[in-house]
Image: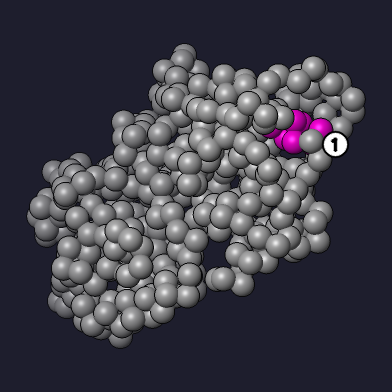
Amino acid sequence: MKKFISLLAIATVLLTSGCSGTNTASNDSPAATQPPEDTTPVKIQYWHAHAENQMGGVKYMIEQFQNKYPHITVEPVFQGGYSDLQQKLQAAIAAKDVPAVTNIEVSAIPSFSESGALADLGPYIKRDKVDTADFSKGMLDAYAFKGKQVGFPLIVSTSVMVYNKTLLDKLGVKPPQTWSEIEAYNQKVTLKEGDKTTRYALAVPGWDIWYHDPWILNGGGTILSKDETKATVDSPESLRYLNNFKKWFDDGSLQIGVGKGASDTMRQMFLDEKIGMVQHSSAIIKTYVENAKFEVGVSFVPGDKTRISNIGGAGIVMMSGVKDNQKEAAWKFINFMTSAEHNIKWAEAVGYLPTHKSSVKTDEGKKYQEKWPQYKAVLENFDNVTPRYQHTAYTEFSNLYKDAINKMVLEKGDPQKVMQEAVVKMNKVLADQ
C-alpha cells in the first residue's frame, strides 16, 4: 500500500494553496475570487465507469452542459469498471497526463486524496456559493477527506433489503426493522423439506464487505481502534452480527452468497421465490422490480445499536495535475453534473439515488417517488446513509475480513476463530502504514 501511495505522491502535481474545508478559502487561492468569464475554447476529458444502460443519461447531461457552456467540450472516455479505471488513473498520474474529471469509487477516495492527486473543491464551492447543506450529509462526507472536499456524490447507492412483498403479505409478515425481529421473521418465512431449505428467509452477500460493514457498526462494533492502529473486527461487539449469521446459516434460514456468480445466483433465487428477502444494492432495485412476477418491496437495513447503511458507487472529482483553464472547466462540469436542478432526471436515467434533499421535494421528485415507491425506504433514511470507512488501506485490509466470512461459510468455520486469524493479517497491513 505504501508503494501505491508513494507512486501517487511522486507523480502528482500538488495544489500549492487552497482551503482546508468546504466552507473556507485562503485569500491567495486562484479560485477564491470569480475570474473574468473566459470563453476561450477548452476541451476536457471525463473518464468514467458508467455502464451502457447509463449512457443515455450521461449523453443528455453533457449535451445540456455544452448548451450552457458552448466553449467547453467534454469528451467522455469509458475506462471499464471501477478497478480498471483506478489502475488507469494510477498510470496516468505516473505519466503526468491525467484527465480533468473522473469517477472514483468511494473506498478509493482516501488513497487518491492522501497523495494529492485530487484537487480541493473548497475554494470553488465558496466562490460560487454552492449550497452543500442541500446534499445528503453522508453522501457529501464520503467524498471529503481530512477536511477537504475532493469530490461530489454522483452515482450513489447504498445497501437495502429487497423483499417479496406479495409473499410477506400472504404470510402476514413485515420486513424486520430491528435485530430482535429477525428471528421471528426467519421462522415464519423459511420453508424446509426435512433438513433441506427450499425457501430461505434472508440472503446476504459475501462477495463484498460493503454489505457487512453496516452490520458490524449497527451492532455496536468497530472495524479499527480509535487510533486506527489495530483491527477490532474480532471484538465481542463486532462479532455479534456474525454469530447471528452463523446461527441462521446453520439452521437453514440464511443464505450467504460467496464465490463466482454469487450475485447473479442470489438475484435469480429471489426472483424464483426461493428467498424471501435479500440484501443488495439500491442500484439493483429497478432490475428486481422490472423482472419480478410479484410485488417488490424495499426496507432499510435493520439496526440494533444504530441503524445506518454505507455509501456505495462513485463520485466525480477533479484531478489536480491539469492546467488552470481545464480546472475551471472541470469545476463547472462537476457542479453542473451534481446540481439539484438535474438531480432527479439524472437519478432516474442511471438508476442511482438522488443526492439532494431539495430535489426530492420538487414536483419532479414527487413524481419520481410515485413511480418508484421502493426508494421511499432510502429517502426516509437520507441522513442514515453514511460514508464507508475512510482509511488509505481500507481496500487491502477489508478483503482480509471478507475472506474470513467466506471461510466461515465454505468451511463452516467458527466466527471468532476466523476473525482472530484475519485480525493478525490486518494488523500487519496497518503496521506498514
The answer to whether residue 40 is seen in the rendering is: yes
Side of 267 relative to 175 (left or right): right
Residue 215 seen: no
Residue at left offset 69%, top offset 49%: 14
* 126 on left or right of 256: right
Residue under numbered circle 1: 43
* Quadrant of residue 381 within the rendered picture: top left
* Colour convention: one colour
Q: Residue 247: x and y, percent?
A: 16, 71
Percent across and percent down for residue 134 are 45, 24
Which secondary structure dominates the residues rendered in magenta? Answer: helix
Magenta segment, which residues? 325-331
Residue visible at 68% across and 43% down?
16
Residue 56 sits above or below residue 364 on the image: below
Residue 69: % across, % down? 79, 22
The residue closer to the viewer here, 92 or 244, is 92
